[in-house]
Image (cartoon, grey):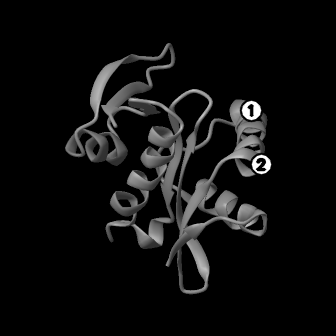
């Protein structure tokens, strides 16, 4: 089932985020990520995929800057099309917020990089830490 997340989903969303094998959260960025997530909970939408009575994946956009803040699937549920289903919902949130282009970053050499390239996202640069910057017209 796809639905908007509730505040009560926060713990499980955090569990999913921390369970991923690639693009692990840098410990130095934990407090910043938590701050952004709190703002989005209050002002935006986390889209979640619920299966087996728990959130197994989520997608979320930050409508302040036109970015896809996160798309993460629990490793036990990868390869089922969950990401391809959830990502357009987050992109649509950005479109509704007035953005014509969505931006996201991911680590090079990961499955995520291949996922975004296959989905039509275009590499537009690199961050100082090597993260690939992708954009896609909405």
Question: Residue 123 is drawn in which quadrant?
Answer: top left
Disc 1: which residue: 32
Category of crowding for the residue at label 1, using alpha-carbon neighbours closer than 10 angstroms: few (below 14), some (14–19), many (at least 20):
few
Residue 16 relative to residue 78: left or right: right
Q: Residue at x 45, y 33 (%)?
A: 104
**Image position of 57 with respect to 132: above or below:** below
Question: Residue 101 is drawn in which quadrant?
Answer: top left
Inter-mark Cα distance, 1 to 2: 16 Å
Q: Residue at x 24, y 39 (%)?
A: 117
Q: What is the secondary structure assignment of the residue under circle 1?
A: helix
Residue 36 relative to residue 53: left or right: right
Spot occupied by residue 63 in the image (x, y as percentages of width and height): 59, 36
Q: Residue at x 33, y 58 (%)?
A: 84
Spot occupied by residue 32 in the image (x, y as percentages of width and height): 74, 32
Query: Residue placed farthest to the bottom in the image?
Result: 52
* Marks 1 and 2, the one that precedes in the sequence: 1
Category of crowding for the residue at label 2, using alpha-carbon neighbours closer than 10 angstroms: few (below 14), some (14–19), many (at least 20):
few
Residue 108 relative to residue 9: left or right: left
Spot occupied by residue 3 in the image (x, y as percentages of width and height): 56, 70
Disc 2: which residue: 42
Q: Residue at x 57, y 27 (%)?
A: 65
Of the pair 74 and 69, the residue shown nearer to us: 69
Query: Residue placed farthest to the top in the image?
Result: 128
Question: Which mark, by number, is residue 4?
Answer: none
Q: What is the secondary structure assignment of the residue under circle 2?
A: helix
Q: Are marks 1 and 2 in contact (CB under 8 Å)?
A: no
Spot occupied by residue 93 in the image (x, y as percentages of width and height): 51, 46
């Amino acid at each position: 089932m796809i639905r908007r997340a509730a505040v009560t989903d926060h713990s499980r969303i955090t569990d999913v985020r921390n369970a991923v094998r690639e693009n692990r959260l840098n410990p130095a960025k934990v407090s910043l990520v938590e701050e952004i997530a709190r703002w989005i909970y209050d002002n935006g939408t986390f889209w979640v995929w619920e299966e087996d009575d728990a959130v197994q994946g989520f997608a979320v956009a930050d409508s302040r800057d036109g970015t896809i803040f996160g798309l993460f699937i629990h490793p036990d549920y990868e390869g089922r099309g969950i990401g391809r289903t959830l990502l357009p919902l987050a992109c649509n949130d950005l479109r509704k917020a007035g953005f014509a282009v969505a931006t996201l970053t991911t680590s090079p050499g990961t499955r995520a990089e291949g996922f975004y390239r296959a989905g039509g996202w275009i590499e537009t640069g690199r961050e100082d830490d090597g993260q690939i910057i992708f954009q896609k017209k909405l």
